[in-house]
Image (cartoon, grey):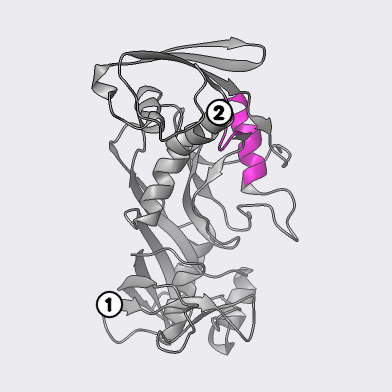
Amino acid sequence: MRATMAGGQQIIDVRLGPDHAGWRLDRALAHAIPTLSRERLKALIRSGALTPPLRDPAARVKGDEAFRLAVPAPEPAHNEPQDIPLRIVFEDEHLLVIDKPAGLVVHPAAGNRDRTLVNALLHHCGASLSGIGGVARPGIVHRIDKDTSGLLVAAKTDVAHEGLARQFARHSIDRRYLAIVSGVPRAGGGTVDAPLARSSANRKKIAVVKAKDDGGRGKRAVTHWKRLAVLRDAALVECRLETGRTHQVRVHMASIGHPLVGDSTYGGSGKTHRKLLNELSFHRQALHAAGLGFIHPVGKHRLSFESGMPPDMQELFTALGV
């Protein structure tokens, strides 16, 4: 494979060997060009970017064939790069892992059009973003709530984005959270296996729904939790996600009678801790993404990261100590 730049495009010359004979065209090119995902190659083939001209990604390769692929420069992202400090835990040419502070929104949306993690990553990565689906943007494959702190992975390349998304879809990503919950669970741990869906009473909330009568709205959600420390009318728990649904830890812990301290949405800002929370100026759910592990989508080696409890949550933990 040889890549050059010409006329604002990347020109990739590639030869498919005899071993590729009989393969689908898109699969063979993805094998020979590891920087582009199969989905991206399908789109390029259909757009006429391949010479000799072939527009069917499912066409069978004869073997020992040479092709030239013209890859347009990534289109500029709609979001604006903004210089926002980030704590980068790990970075290479394919992806980066960020330790997100509480208060930072991950993706622009209504009410938060800028000053988000995406804006920060566009500034930090610059030209190193090779394009996700042809657009120069970071590939956000999972999110954590604005007021949750901790570890999050983002892709810089199309192939990394596809590989990470596949792992999240298979629920093979290791995700470990630390939470301070209201009340002390009697058991030392357990599993909450309860489907989640958008609440029909309040569209801003997620609710546990009954599988038999939810009309198919609910998605399976599984949280494994373990009590780590007994505090004053509270406890520190570790939650490991088997699935990764919106607000999963917050809703599941509330569903067993132990909402997260500080979580006004799901009942964790009751009278028991309100005075202390005000004294500490702790105005968020006590939740931190403390562990993240996955297989590097390109290098295929295992990556694992740990993040200690942030200062505000550590202060709350100390104040609740018995």
Q: Is residue 301 above or below residue 19?
A: below
Give the residues in magenta: 118-134
Give the crowd class for mark 1: few <14, some 14-19, many >=20 residues within 10 Å: some
Instruction: Give residue 29's quadrant in the image.
Output: top left
Split into 4 quadrants, where in the image is the N terminus?
Answer: top left
Out of 167 and 47, give the one closest to the viewer: 47
- Residue 200 visible in the picture: yes
Amino acid type for the residue under numbered disc 1: Gly
Q: Which mark is residue 130?
A: 2
Q: Secondary structure at mark 1?
A: strand
Tell which tag, 2 or 1, sits nearer the viewer.
2
Q: Name the residue beneath numbered marker 1.
A: 189
Q: Position of residue 296 (x, y in %)?
A: 35, 38
Task: Give the distance between the C-alpha atoms of the residues marked 2 and 1, in whole angstroms.
Answer: 44 Å
Q: Position of residue 142 (x, y in %)?
A: 49, 54
Tell me which numbered mark, 2 or 1, is placed earlier along the sequence: 2
Amino acid type for the residue under numbered disc 2: Ser
Q: Main secondary structure of the magenta part?
A: helix
Split into 4 quadrants, where in the image is the C terminus?
Answer: bottom left
Q: Identify which residue is drawn at 61% across, 25% down.
A: 127
Instruction: Give residue 198's quadrant in the image.
Output: bottom right
Out of 5 and 256, give the one closest to the viewer: 5
